[in-house]
Image: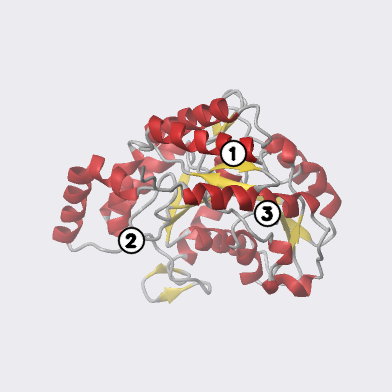
Amino acid sequence: MHISFLDLKAQYQTIKKEIKKEIEEVLESGNYILGPKEKEFEKEIAEYLGVKHAIGVANGTDALVLSLDALGIGPGDEVITTPYTFFASAEAVSRVGAKPVFADISFDDNLNIDVRQIKKKITKNTKAIIPVHIFGCPCNMDEIIQIARKYNLYIIEDACQAIGAQYKGKKAGTLGDIGCFSFFPTKNLGGYGDGGLVVTNNDEIAEKIMTLRVHGSTKKYYHSRIGYNSRLDEIQAAILKVKLKYIDKWNQKRIEKAKLYNDKLKNLPITLPKIYDENHKKHVFHLYTILTPKRDELKNYLEQKGIPTGIYYPLPLHLQEAYKDLGYKDGDMPNAEKASRQALSLPLYPELKEEEIYYITEAVKTFFERV
């Protein structure tokens, strides 16, 4: 049996006609940057998320950078985030000249940042918290909001992996001051190239983001601040407009397949991702990630059976070469380090067939019977 870790072509086949029609309309219009499709997409996704402002940018990393810049965060400032995430979550902090400060993760909360650790990292220089809704599972936002209010900190939600996820009925990315999303092709809502989004209910922040994305300009050739060139392409906006209609259906399929995985893998010596009551947290499973001390051996065994897997993430951010000047060492973030040694992501996407999940889970069971 041939199994893909992620099959983007399978999804494309289901919406091919709609996608081609939208792209054709863009090409015929001659509007390729910040055109009508982009404005329509911003309006539709703002309504979907339940926010006042949605601003398309070039990618998820830029979404974070522009957000930090708009809040005036820069040299001398500190921003608390997780070491167990894609590099961009901390890189954006460094890009604006601020210092990323890492707080360890919690095994009780699907590898999200540990709220108790955030409190320990706050100093007089702390200006913001970037909680990352890792793998599509929302962080414990009530507690993070409580901390932010107490210490007068901004919250920039990194919801790049969590479009459509919910925390107590509210969409991930809409609970803090700013939310950031990525439309990288592998995301639950992915374009056919790069793309990103910033959302906020704050008019002043929205105005700054809109200005920053076009070279700090509100009127052509007049620049009120130093900005960036970071806009969501019209063709990507047109594609995402089509896909947005299906995101809840696709996410539901991910959840159902994650439940099937959990059912088939229970009673094995592995840690399975938690699936919460959806009134509390709706986890949209950008990745389905298990933990096992036998990670590398299991990965090799599954590959021999034609089952591709992924390691997210093999080295936590506090131990990356790029951050050696921050002075972290092995043992400083024990949970993140353990997760990096044990995490293995199994194939999961809306079009993955049940019989493929049966094949994968049988292979996992066979492996543990042998060891």
Note whether 264 is above or below 312 in the view shown: above
Give the residue drawn at x 21%, y 45%. Answer: 16
- Circle 2 — which element? loop
Taking the image as shown, residue 331 lies to the left or right of residue 339, namely right
CA distance separating discs 2 and 1? 28 Å
Q: Nearer the viewer, mark 2 or mark 1?
A: 1
Q: Which mark is residue 340?
A: 3
State which mark lies toward you, 1 or 3.
3
Residue toward you, 236 or 306 = 306
Whether tag 1 and tag 3 are in contact, CB under 8 A, the answer is no
Residue 129 visible to an observer of this rendering: no
What's the residue at 44%, 53% (across, down)? 55
Q: Which residue reaches farthest front?
A: 370
**Which element is circle 3 on?**
helix
- Neighbours of disc 1 within 10 Å: few (<14), some (14-19), many (20+): many
Q: How many marks?
A: 3
Q: Position of residue 26 (x, y in %)?
A: 20, 57
Report the Cα–Cα distance between label 2 and label 3. Answer: 35 Å
Q: Earlier in the sequence, mark 2 or mark 1?
A: 1
Q: Where 38 sits versus 76, above or below? A: above
Q: Amino acid at mark 1?
A: Cys
Circle 1 is placed at which residue position? 137
First along the sequence among labels 2 and 3 = 2
Mark 2 and 1 residues: CB-CB less than 8 Å, in contact? Answer: no
* Amino acid bearing label 3: Ser
Q: Residues within 10 Å of mark 3 (few under 14, many from 20)?
A: some
Above or below 43: residue 220: below
Q: Earlier in the sequence, mark 1 or mark 3?
A: 1
Please provide percent x and percent y for residue 270. Answer: 66, 37
* Image quadrant assignment for residue 79: bottom right
| 53 left or right, relative to 279 | left
- The residue to which callout 2 is attached is 233
